[in-house]
Image (tube, coloured by chain):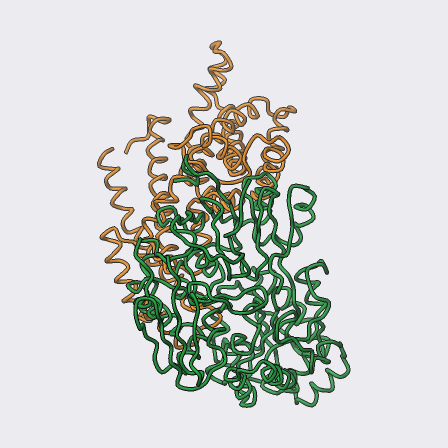
Chain colours: A green, B orange
Amino acid sequence: MAATAPANAESVLKIVPHADLRNVDPIWTTAYITRNHGYLVFDTLFALDENLEVQPQMAAGHAVSEDGLTYTITLRDGLTFHDGSAVTAEDVVASLKRWGARDGMGQKLMGVTASLEAADDKTVVLTLSESYGLVLQSLGKISSNVPFIMPKRLAETDPNAQVEEIIGSGPFKFVADEWQPGNQVVYEKFEEYVPREEPASYAAGGKVAKVDRVEWRYIPDAATASQALLAGEVDYYEQPAVDLLPMIQSDPSIKVETVDPLGTQGVIRFNFKYPPFDNKKARQAAMWAVQQADYMYSIMGDPAYFEEFCGAYFMCGGPYETDIGSEALREKDIEKAKALLAESGYDGREVLILDPTDIPVAHGQSLVTAQALREIGMNVKLVAMDWATMTSRRAVREAPEDGGWNIFPTWWLAADQLNPVTNISVAASGGNAWFGWPENQKIEDLRNAFAKETDAAKQMEIIEELQAELYDFVPYIPTGQYYQPTAFRDNVNGVLEAPVPFFWNISVE
Amino acid sequence: MYAYIIRRLIATIPIMAIVAVFVFMLLHLSPGDPAAIIAGDFATEEQIIKIREQLGLNDPLYIQFGSWLVNLLQGDMGQSIYSGLPVTKLIGQRLEPTLMLTLCTMLIAITLAIPLGVIAAWKVGTWIDRMVMTLAVFGFSVPVFVIGYLLILGGSRTLGWFPVQGYTSILESVPGFLSHIALPALTLGAVYMALIARMTRATMLEVLNEDYVRTAYAKGLATRKVLVKHALKNAMVPISTTIGLGVALLIGGVVVTESVFAIPGLGRLTVDAVLRTDYPVIQGVILVFSFTYVLLNLLIDLSYVLFDPRIRY
């Protein structure tokens, strides 16, 4: 019943993950913890490397027709599912279709897909109805939902229901019998997995399982988890609390590193359906009233773990970084903010900021925003709640006084924010857009133009025009870019630098 | 007496029914939508609606309650909305740690607190009495998690005698079990010990002033015999009531203790389920806790017979 390794296990990597694994189907949910679990168990057709380029993973290679409409993808040899069956093109087609029904980027790809078929056991043929620039970026998507490949019999599950069984073709097998939600998840090395020859690089390259067993021990209390790491009861602590780092770092046998080089973006989101933030000037006023450093000190504390300033909606350090239009965010100007607020016709009405007090990153952002808006004369009310309640409250489309809201805080991993297609908080399609429901045709046109553009230089031109529009329209305030440190003991070697914690390539002494 | 036990057992049925209705209504009328949590940030409203349909959350409340009740009567508590695992399996996985933690806590608390309370009453007004009562106030006032952290710091990190966290089944390794359970049981036991020690002292003081105690002394009985056989036995009825009522306190403390020591028990299962509005799990756990509590009170009532022969059922 308890978490002890069998006697014949040679090496065990014990991890404290950032959250509890409650659901195991990475297509059904977008939870990051389920995505991380997915990477252990499943494999992908393509994968992103550290240069943010898409590389073949299960694919041996691919060919594109001259008109750019037909992609022929060949599977590499030796791919086997954990139930012993061989991976076929049929499995890939069924898996991509299920993913395409759930994932935002997948839905876009399916929208321009004329047909997706298995030509033979090893060949998948994707035919587009119009030219599309993000085919490989979609299939090699690194974050939720990742297009993981499952056996056809499982991939045929209704996309809105969970798969009954977790069978992948990745480097580790999920041990269903030992899964105890709220306590532990166990993975065993899959002996038949054939890694690629190339060195591991982000999600691409050779995924070599160097331990026999990976155990996730969920320890909800940050102080206990830190003590367990210090006592050597666990090897790797994915997201230690920043205020406990000095204690952890005082032990020379612990290494603290920022494993994710791209970081995370804080987000303050407005409700576009109701005053005052249905008016552009009010949103601009809010942006002039805040500065990123206030947010970052409040949620991370130590400047070693955040950027002094990042004016890029699509992340600093990413391929589409630019600071065009970011003056309002760079400088704090209370007078200008007050003037803009007056121009917006703000009538002193109450502004409701949702405040999920159980999530420090979100809570800090709510407090800083409330203070800044009060400074420019807004009548702010912080509504305290837990995160679970907030996730349903933010979906309420009624007026703030009828159970709705004006502002809520959240955060996104850079891996999700890197381009205007995956960054859904810039989408502005009105009622269909992400919570807050902004509507702006120019932004939507530019996002579509970006998706269809195949030339990198032209894509960048679109990004610059788009970002200028975003700073004028303010779909949300990017409250800063920060980096989550990870702590592990010095017996752990080979931890990969990547925006997702990968557990291949890691050995334990 | 058997008729009484059967009557009491039958009486638990309406109690459990009321608990079931209450828990169900409370949960479903409070905010929080599991479908929205599952669907995540990227989901469209349409997807959330589809998931809600899949989970049967769109049906009217009375239908949801009805089908839950019908399944419950067949021993099926439903499935976790998140993991899809049967609630009975989840509870089964978690029952042993919580049961053992509670039993060990009660064992430690009762064997330490009753003698301490008796001694405090016997030596009333002396430094021994004051020390015992100071400890009791400390145990009662310091939050459970603070005691837990202090014990981890001292027992695990400084002395290195005990592991920081986790649980080992008693079936797997007895020394492993004992080393894992010691600190959590002490942590959880602090408040319980304080309660029992104070109650024992107060009741003993009352009994020690009775005429028959004076008579016992007068006829030359040894102090130990007077205290244990004459006084304590008569004081046991209110003390055992306190022990029974204190279990409610333990159930609250289990939640915190299991979180601090990362013990995979029912307390943690409850907290996790509440935070994610996992209705079937919360309902199942609360039913189990309520049933245990009702059953325990019955046992306590029956135990009165042992201490006071005048009581008959």
User: Horizontal and vertical percent for residue B76?
Assistant: 27, 53
Query: For this rendering, which residue is in front, A417 or A110?
Result: A110
Where B35 sits versus A248, above or below? below
Residue visible at 38% across and 65% down in the picture: A75
Residue at left offset 54%, top offset 26%: B116
Quadrant occupied by the N terminus of chain B: top left
- Tell which of A212 and A35 is nearer to you: A212
What percent of the width, then of the height, locates residue B145? 57, 44
**Residue A482 falls in which quadrant of the image?**
bottom right
Q: Position of residue B194 (x, y in %)?
A: 54, 35
Rendered image quadrant of residue A251: top right
For residue B23, say whether it is visible: no
Q: Above or below — where is A189 with respect to A415? A: above
Left or right relative to B162: residue A62: left
Q: Position of residue A107 (x, y in %)?
A: 42, 77
Q: Which residue occupies the foreground of this view, B5 or A301?
A: A301
* A217 sits left or right of A379 in the view: left
Q: Can residue B304 be spotted in the picture? A: yes
Q: Is residue A210 left or right of residue A326?
A: left
